[in-house]
Image: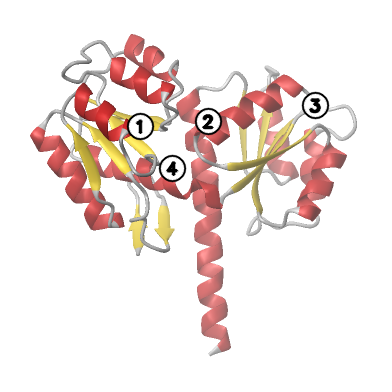
Amino acid sequence: MSFFGVSGMYYSGESLQQHRIVLAEDSNLFSAMVSKRLKELFDIDVIVCRDYDDLQFSVENASFPATLAISNINLPGAENGEALSYLIDMSVPTIVFTGTFQENTRETILAKDIVDYVIKDSVFAVDMLAESVCRFLTNHQHHVLIVDDSPTARALLTTQLKRYNFRTSSAESGAAALELLKKHPDIGLVITDYNMPDIDGFELTRRIRSTYGPHQLRIIGVSSSANRLLSARFLKAGGNDFMLRPFVNEEFYCRVNQNLDTLTKIQTLGAKIAKKASV
C-alpha cells in the first residue's frame, strides 16, 4: 500500500490492519467519514464509540489493547473532557479530533500528553487525521538520536519523541553521539544542542557529515541562545534545520516530520534509480 499525506508524508509498506483503533465520536457524519477513510487507506477496521460508556467498555473489555484512540473533546456522558483523561489514564495514545478549539483548549489538551490534535475546520480534516494516524503507526520505523549534555533536556526530548512513537537513543556528548552512530546505522535523524563541553554542535555536525551524507541522515541543531546567527552556522556546517528553545510542540513535531519525510523520499528515489540501473 502507498499513502501520500496532506503535509507531504509518503508511506509505502504493508497494510496497517493489525492495529486496533478506537474512535470516540458521537457525530454519525464524522464517525462514518473517518471509519471509511481509514479502511480505504490502511485497511483498518475502526471501533466506533458513541458515548463514554461505549468507550470504557471498548477499552476495558478488548481481547487486546488499542494501539491508538481518536477522540472528540466532548462526548455524551463526558461533556467536560473526561474521555481524554480516561484514555490517558489507561495509557492509550490519543489523537484529538475536535471542532471546538481556542487557545485555552489547546493548552488543556496538550497538558494531557496527547499525541496530536486535528481540527474539523476544513475539507482536508479527515485526510489530515488519516495522516496523523499513519505517522503514529509507522513512526517506530524511525530512529532518532538526541545529543545534549543536559540530562533534563535529553529526558524532555526523549519523552516527547516517544509520545509520537519514535525509537530514540541519547548521548551526553558529541563523542558519545559519534559512537552511537557507528553502533546504530539505522539512525535517521540527529537532534543536537549547540553548547556542549567536548564537541559543540557545529563541530559534531561537521564530523557527522564527513561520514554520513544527507541521503543517510538528517541533522537538526537546537539552542537556547538568542544569537540568530546560530541557525546560519548550523546550516553551513551541514545541518538541515535549526530550532530555538523553548519549542512549540506543534512546530517541533512538524520539523521532525518534515526532515524524516525528506529523508524517506530521497532514499525511495535512490532505491528506484539503483533498481533501474541494475536492470
User: For mark 3, what is the residue?
Assistant: 149
Q: Mark 4 points at which residue?
A: 136
Q: Considering only order in the chain, which callout, 3 or 2, is on the residue closer to the N terminus? A: 3
Type of the residue with mark 4: Phe
Residue 10 placement, left or right of 271: left
- Amino acid type assigned to the residue bearing label 3 in the image: Asp
Reading the image, the residue beneath label 2 is: 252
Instruction: Name the image quarter holding the N terminus.
Output: bottom left
Q: What is the C-alpha distance between the residues marked 2 and 4?
A: 15 Å
Q: Which of marks 1 and 2 is in front?
A: 1
Distance between mark 3 and mark 1 Cα atoms? 32 Å
99 in relation to 125, above or below: above
- Sequence-wise, the earlier of marks 2 and 4 is 4
| Residue 8: x %, y % from top left | 40, 49
Bin the neighbour count of mark 1 within 10 Å (Cα to Cα): few under 14, some 14-19, many 20 and up. many
Cα distance, mark 1 to mark 4?
9 Å
Q: Foreground mark, 3 or 1?
A: 1
Q: Residue 95 carries which label?
A: 1
Name which residue type carries label 2. Phe
10 Å neighbourhood of mark 4: few (<14), some, or many (≥20)?
Answer: many
Mark 2 vs mark 4: in front:
4
Residue at image position (88%, 27%) is 197
Q: Is residue 170 above or below residue 2?
A: above
